[in-house]
Image (spheres, rainbow, N blue to C red):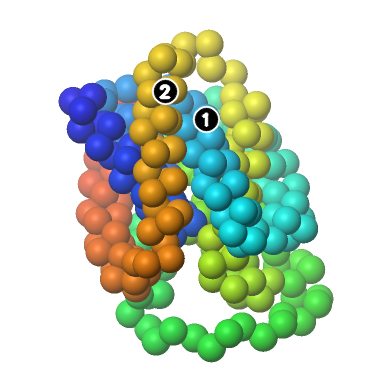
């Protein structure tokens, strides 16, 4: 089963590199349902994997001038604060409740990707009115941070649209900026956890190394792969995962 887990790690890295988000949301389901880890431990394990993988991808995009550093810092401050607080609170939630929240988040990610892949490409975004951007971007950052702290998801599927629509960031720069923000909020979420002593670090490092390989390849492939087709196929896969997660954890007791 570990070989299958590493195959998913490669896929997670590839998706993060090409889309700036979406792939990391699969890390916890892979740890729980493919590799058999406890949900709470899986969430703790996912944060360093997603964070380091995103950081490597962000460096690649930064070298290609595809990171808006000031925007990432503004967005990241709010995501980090929310991720830390949510991670501290998450100890009060049952593991199955966290998986249910994750299932709803994956469903949302799938629907957003499917919508984006089916509609015509919009024109380049105009500059957003200052007042709207000033308040909406921090609120989006808080929402992403809460999601990261509670269920270990990087939140790129929310970050990329928020950057494009609220901050008028071009898509390629939104991907690189999203990876930077993910690296920041997963670090804060990990700092807020209390059960890191039981993490199997040897496996996490190996899994992370495979994911890093994927994101390096994905960052290069992003220049050549048609994102509409990729989003459509990945969205269908996410829908399947979301339905299984919600079905497995809805209305059941703690694991």
Question: What residue did someone put label 1 on?
Answer: 48
> Looking at the image, is mark 2 or mark 1 earlier in the sequence?
1
- Measured along the vertical axis of the image, is residue 241 above or below residue 135? above
Residue closest to the far top: 197
* Disc 1 secondary structure class: helix
Q: Looking at the picture, how far across and down is residue 157, in whole percent? A: 48, 58
Q: Are marks 2 and 1 in contact (CB under 8 Å)?
A: yes
In this rendered view, identify the residue nearer to me: 55 or 33: 55
* Residue 75 visible to an observer of this rendering: no
Q: Identify the residue at horizontal 34%, vertical 71% (top origin).
A: 226
Q: Quadrant of the N terminus?
A: top left
* Quarter of the image where one finds residue 252: top left
Residue at point 58%, 38% (across, down)? 186
Q: Tell me which residue sits at (33%, 80%) in the image.
A: 118
Tell me residue 29's x, y (percent): 32, 37
Q: Is residue 53 left or right of residue 26?
A: right
Q: Give the residue number, with chain letter if any, for mark 2.
A: 204
Question: Could you say whether the residue bearing mark 2 is in a helix, strand or loop?
Answer: helix
Task: Give the distance between the C-alpha atoms of the residues marked 2 and 1, in whole angstroms.
Answer: 8 Å
Residue 41 in the image, given as x and y percentages of width and height: 43, 22
């Amino acid at each position: 089963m570990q070989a299958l887990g590493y195959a998913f790690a490669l896929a997670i890295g590839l998706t993060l590199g090409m889309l700036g988000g979406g792939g990391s949301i699969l890390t916890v389901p892979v740890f729980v349902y493919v590799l058999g880890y406890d949900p709470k431990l899986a969430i703790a394990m996912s944060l360093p994997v997603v964070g380091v993988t995103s950081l490597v991808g962000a460096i690649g995009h930064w070298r290609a001038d595809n990171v808006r550093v000031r925007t990432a810092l503004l967005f990241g401050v709010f995501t980090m604060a929310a991720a830390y607080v949510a991670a501290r609170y998450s100890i009060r939630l049952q593991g199955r409740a966290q998986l249910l929240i994750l299932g709803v988040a994956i469903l949302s990610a799938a629907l957003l990707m499917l919508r984006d892949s089916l509609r015509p490409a919009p024109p380049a975004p105009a500059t957003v009115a200052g007042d709207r951007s000033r308040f909406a971007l921090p609120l989006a950052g808080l929402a992403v941070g809460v999601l990261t702290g509670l269920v270990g998801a990087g939140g790129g599927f929310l970050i990329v649209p928020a950057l494009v629509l609220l901050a008028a960031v071009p898509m390629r720069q939104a991907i690189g900026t999203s990876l930077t923000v993910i690296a920041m909020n997963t670090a804060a979420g990990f700092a807020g956890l209390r059960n890191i002593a039981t993490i199997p670090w040897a496996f996490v490092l190996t899994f992370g190394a495979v994911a890093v390989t994927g994101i390096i390849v994905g960052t290069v492939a992003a220049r050549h792969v048609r994102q509409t087709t990729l989003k459509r196929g990945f969205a269908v896969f996410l829908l399947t995962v979301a339905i299984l997660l919600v079905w497995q954890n809805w209305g059941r007791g703690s694991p």
